[in-house]
Image: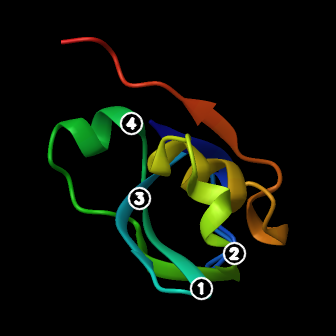
Amino acid sequence: MGLTMNKDPNTGIELEGLYYRLDKINFNDFNFQVVITGYASQKAHQEGHLPIAQPRAVTWDYSKEDLLNVNIFEYAYTMLKTHEDFKSAEDVLEPAE
């Protein structure tokens, strides 16, 4: 799973189909954090090209109950899309291998 947008919120680069992937998930008793990186496209990521947007950490408060009976990655992407910079992001599903 990933996210696409047409503008990088950090750099202002505008490119149709910018592709963001979660690199890391960290959480403790109070905070949930994801680190995301942006690529020119999903294909660029799959082919191993370097990212065009530097990794960025986004942190929010959460309750442990938020993670009960949910996929942690789906939770992370869903919550990331509530962040002001990623409200326009759309989900991208990975192709089946």
Whether residue 25 is visible here, answered yes or no, is: yes
In this rendering, would 66 be left or right of 39? Answer: right
Residue type beneath disc 2 = Tyr
Whether residue 16 is visible here, answered yes or no, is: no
Q: Residue at x 59, y 50 (%)?
A: 75
Mark 4, Cα crowd under 10 Å, few <14 / some 14-19 / many 20+, is many
**Mark 3 to mark 1 CA distance (whole Å):** 17 Å
Q: Which mark is residue 31?
A: 1
Residue type beneath disc 3 = Leu
Mark 2 touches mark 1? (CB < 8 Å): yes
Q: Position of residue 35 (x, y in %)?
A: 44, 74
First of labels 2, 1 by sequence position: 1
Q: According to the image, label 4 marks what residue?
A: 42
**Mark 1 to mark 4 CA distance (whole Å):** 29 Å
Q: Position of residue 92 (x, y in %)?
A: 53, 30
Q: According to the image, label 3 marks what residue?
A: 22
Q: Residue at x 59, y 85 (%)?
A: 31
